[in-house]
Image (spheres, grey):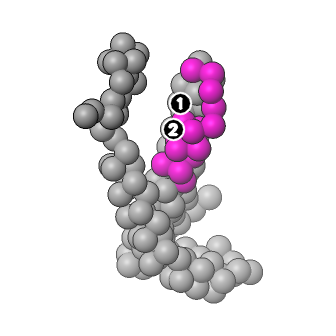
Amino acid sequence: MAMRTPLKDVRRLGSAKEGTDHFWRQRVTSVAALLLLPFALWIVLALVGADYDVVRRTLGNPVVAVLVLLFILTSIMHMRIGMQVIIEDYVQAEGAKIALLMLNTFFSVLVGLAGAFAVLRLSFGVAI
């Protein structure tokens, strides 16, 4: 005996086949961000109150710059996926849902690019 009703076929509201992908992407980005978090906190706390030249020299180290970039990008990806799930689950109006999903993507890209630009600019030693 099938558990599906004919109503499902009429409405075409079956699985979008993306749930597992979102689940794993969110888990992988959270683990990556958690692994990078102690390093990011250490760098931030070490640079609190430091002058521009110290920050530039610290981020001039390629290992430090790459790890900070990885932390920023994995955190932004995790944030975007999490907000997408919240919007899809709790916003009922289809127009508002689409607008919020687009704004979520634009905001995530903007914040990610701004963070990456700041780190790369400091790491390459471009003066302000």
Which contiguous range is marked in magenta?
79-94
Question: Residue 28, position in %: x, y?
Answer: 38, 64
Answer left or right for 23 relative to 94: left
Q: Is residue 51 left or right of residue 10?
A: right
Q: Amino acid at mark 2?
A: Thr
Left or right of 62? Residue 54 is: right
Q: Position of residue 53 (x, y in %)?
A: 60, 77
Evaluate whether residue 53 shows in this view: no
Q: Position of residue 38 (x, y in %)?
A: 53, 83
Residue 24 shown in magenta: no
Tell me the residue that label 1 is attached to: 102
Q: Please count the marks in the image.
A: 2
Whether label 1 touches label 2, CB < 8 Å? yes
Query: How far is disc 1 from disc 2 in space, using C-alphas?
Result: 5 Å
Q: Nearer the viewer, residue 85 or 42?
A: 85
**In terms of depth relative to the viewer, which is nearer, 90 or 97?**
90
What type of secondary structure mainly makes up the magenta span? helix
Mark seen at residue 48: none
Q: At numbered mark 2, what does the secondary structure look like: helix, strand or loop?
A: helix
Q: Amino acid at mark 1?
A: Met
Residue located at (51% from left, 38% from top): 105
* Residue situated furthest right in the rendering: 49
Residue hosting label 2? 105
Q: Nearer the viewer, residue 62 or 41?
A: 41
From this view, report whether residue 114 is shown above or below residue 58: above
Quadrant for residue 48, please give it.
bottom right
Toward the top, the furthest residue is: 10
**Which residue occupies 65% across, 73% down?**
52
